[in-house]
Amino acid sequence: MTSQTVDTFFLDQFTQRFDFKDREDIVFATDQHVFLFNTRSGATQSITKVAYASEVNQILVAKDGTIWVATRIGLLKISLSKGTEQWISLLNEKTGILRIHEDSRGRLWLGTIMKGVLIYEPETGHLNIVNQTKGLSNNMVVSLLEDNDGVIWAGTFIGISMISPEGEVIGKVFKENGLVDNECNRWSQLKLADGRLVFGSNKGLSFIDPQGYKKQIQEGARPQIYLTGLNNQAADQSSAPIDLFQKFKQNEPIVLPASSRNLELSFALSDYSAPEGSTFAYQIEGYSHDWNYIGSQRKLNLNALPAGNYKILLKGADRWGQWSETPVVIPVTVEEFFYNRWWFYLLCALPFGAFFLMWQQRQRGERTRLEREVQNRTAIIKKQADKLQEVDQMKSRLYTNITHEFRTPLTVISGLADMIEQPANAKNLIKNNSQSLLRLVNQMLDLAKLESGHMKLEPMHADVVPYIQYLIEAIQSLAASKEIKLVFTKEVNQLAMDFDEKKLESIVFNLLSNAIKFTPKNGQVILQLREANGQLQLRVTDNGIGISPDKLPYIFERFYQIDDSSTRKGEGTGIGLTLTKELVELIGGEITVQSPGPQGVGSEFLVALPITHKAPLSLPGITPKSAAQPAKHIEQLTGELEENNLLPPADLPLLLLIEDNADVATYIKACLQNRYTVEWAENGATGIEKALEIIPDIIISDVMMPEKDGYEVCETL
Ligand code: ADP
C-alpha cells in the first residue's frame, strides 16, 4: 500500500465508534463526548455539552439527521439542527444498548444488555419489548440485521431470533439448525448483497439464507397446543380446588360463581423435545385484544376474573418459534357478585323508594290538611264577617228607624207649638228645641240615605247669589245672639247655575253654624262668594278656636269631635261635617279645611262646587226662601190659613188625608179644617177605597204606611 492510498485523520481522541453524517463529516464518540470531524478542513468540534463517561457501543446517523448514540448507560439523542442532546428514558433505568437498527418505518430496534429487543418509535416515544417471555431466544442481544422482507434477525448469546415487523418472535435458529455456534459475537454482523445474513461467533461465521429458512419453517409441521388441566378455586382458598377438566367441553362455557372466580389452567405443546424453549401466550377475548406472553411456563393462574362472558384463548410456540396453528378456546361465564346484580340494586332502592313514597304521601296529606284548615278558617271568617255585616245592617236599620220615629212626633210638636198662644216664651222654647231636634234627626236621616246611596240630587237652574244671601240672613239671628259679626262678601252679583237648594242650604248652614259655635263672643265669621275656574267657591272663615293640624284629617269622620269630653263647650254630635262632605261630593265638588292652630287664629273651610247649566229653570218667584228652617212650610201654610178669609163648610173643597199616624193626621186636620173638608184614611188600602168612593178634590198622602204605601196609592189612583 502506498501512502497515496491512505488518508489519515488525527483525531487526538480515543475514538470508540463513528458514523458518517454526510460525505464530508464524520461523527465519532469517545467515552466522554461526541465530536464532529470535517474531513476537508480537519476541524474537530464537540457536539455534546455534558460529558457522559460511558462506553459507546454504536453511533447511528438516522435518515432524518438525528444522531443516536448507544452506550452502556442508555440511549443519547443529538439533534444538530436544534442543538439539543437528550437521554431517552427507555425502561426507566439505565438500559445498556449494544446495537441500534433503524427500520424502513423510522423505528429504532435496540439490542440491549439482558433486556431483549426494544422497538422504539422516536415520534411517539412508544416502546415495544420483545424478550424471552415473548419467545426471544435470549435477552442479551448483540446484533440486529433486517432481511429483505423486513424481518429483524436478532443475534443473541443463545441463538438467533426472527422478529416480525409487528414485534412477534416468528422463528429461532440454533446450532441444531446449522449455526456454527449458539453464541453470537457483539457487533459481528453483515448483510450480503444477495440478501444473505452473516453472524460472527467465536467458532466462526454463520451464513443464513432468510428466504430458505422461512420456507423451511412454513413447510414444517406446526405444533399443537393442548389443555392438560383446569381447576377452579375459591378466592379465599378455603376449600380444595374443583377439577373442571373432565367436564370441560369446548362449546359449553364454564360457569364460575362470583365467590370463586379463579382458574388454574395447565397446557402443553405437541412437541415435547425441548419444553424449556417453548413460549405460551393467552388472551381474554371479549375483555382485551392483547396477547399476554408468559414464556415457557405451562401453568396459568387467572385470579379475580372479571364478571361477564368471554373466552380464554391459549397459544404456544415451540423451541423454533413456531406458533400453534389453532389456539385452545375456553368459554367462561363469571357470575356477578350479588351486590352488583340489578335485583340487589332494586332491593337496596326499595326502602328508599318506600320511604320517598311515604314522605310524598305525608306531604300530600299535610297539604290537604292545611288546605282544609284554610278552608275551614276562611268559612269561619266569612261567617263572622257576614254576622258583623248583619249586625251592622241591623244597627243602621235601627238607627234609621229610631230617627225616623223621632221625626213624626217632632213635626207634630213643632207644628202644634205654633197654635199655642200663651205663654209666649214657653211657646218659643218648645218651638226652638223641637226644631233643633228635628234638624238633627233630618241630618242623621240624610247621612244614612247618603251612605246607602239613596240620596238623589234635585237640581234647578237659578241665580245662586240671592239664595246664599237669603241663607245668611236666616242665620244672622243666631250669630247676633252670640254677639258674633257675620259678614257676607261676594265678587259677583249674580251667578246662574244648577243647584239643589236643600243640599246647598245644608252645606252653608253646617259650615256657618260650626263657625259661630266655635268662635267666642265678639268674634267674626265671614262667608266669601266668588266664581273661579268654572266653580262656585264659598269660603267660610272665622277667628275662633281653630283646629290643631294633627286633628284636621279626622274632622270629616262620622261622630268625630275634637273635644269629645262631656264638659266640652258647644253642642253637637259630630256628623255635621261628615254630612257636609258627603253632600259636597254628591254634587261633584270638593271641601278643604285650613286651620293654622288652636290659639284663636281661626279656621277656614273652602267649598268648591262645579257650575253647570243642565237643570230645568226654576219658575220665577218660587226660589225657595223657606228651606232654612225645615218646619217653615207648615209654619207658612199655617200663617197663610190664618190670614185668608174663611169659606162656609159646605163650599169647602174635599180633601182626602191618607196618614197612618193618628197624631199627625189630627195635626194636619187641625191646620186645614177651615179651608177644606178633610176626610181621613188610616192606611194606603183604605185610602184608595175612600178616594174612589168620595172622589176628593185633593189628596195628601204619607209615603210609608202599612198595607199599601204612598207610591201604590198614587199608582192605583
Ligand atoms: P259637631 O256637631 O260636633 O259640630 P261637626 O262634624 O260639624 O260636628 O264638626 C266636627 C268637629 O270639628 C267639631 O266637634 C269641632 O271640634 C271641629 N270643628 C268644626 N268646625 C270648626 C270650626 N269652625 N272651628 C273649630 N273647630 C271646628
Image (spheres, grey):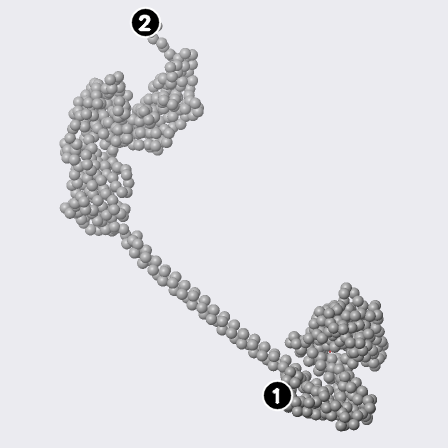
Q: What's the distance in space between the residues labelled 1 and 2, CA to CA?
A: 168 Å
Q: Is residue 279 above or below residue 521?
A: above
Q: Is residue 144 above or below residue 683?
A: above
State the SS at label 1.
Answer: loop
Give the residue type at disc 1: Glu
Q: Nearer the viewer, residue 121 or 373?
A: 373
Residue at the location (84% across, 80% down)? Answer: 480
Does the image show residue 578? no
Residue at the location (30% across, 29% down)? Answer: 118
Q: Callout 1: few (<14), some (14-19), or many (20+) C-alpha neighbours within 10 Å?
A: few
Q: Is residue 251 above or below residue 389?
A: above
State the SS at label 2.
Answer: loop
Is 283 on the left or on the right of 684, as rendered?
left
Is 361 on the left or on the right of 453, as rendered?
left
Give the x, y percent position of residue 39. Answer: 39, 13
Q: Which mark is residue 707?
A: 1
Give the residue type at disc 2: Thr
Residue at the location (38% across, 23% down)? Answer: 64
Asked where in the image residue 504 lies, by quadrant, the reply is bottom right
> Does label 1 or label 2 sit earlier along the sequence?
2
Q: Which mark is residue 2?
A: 2
Q: Nearer the viewer, residue 227 or 300?
A: 227
Asked where in the image residue 18 lies, by quadrant, the reply is top left
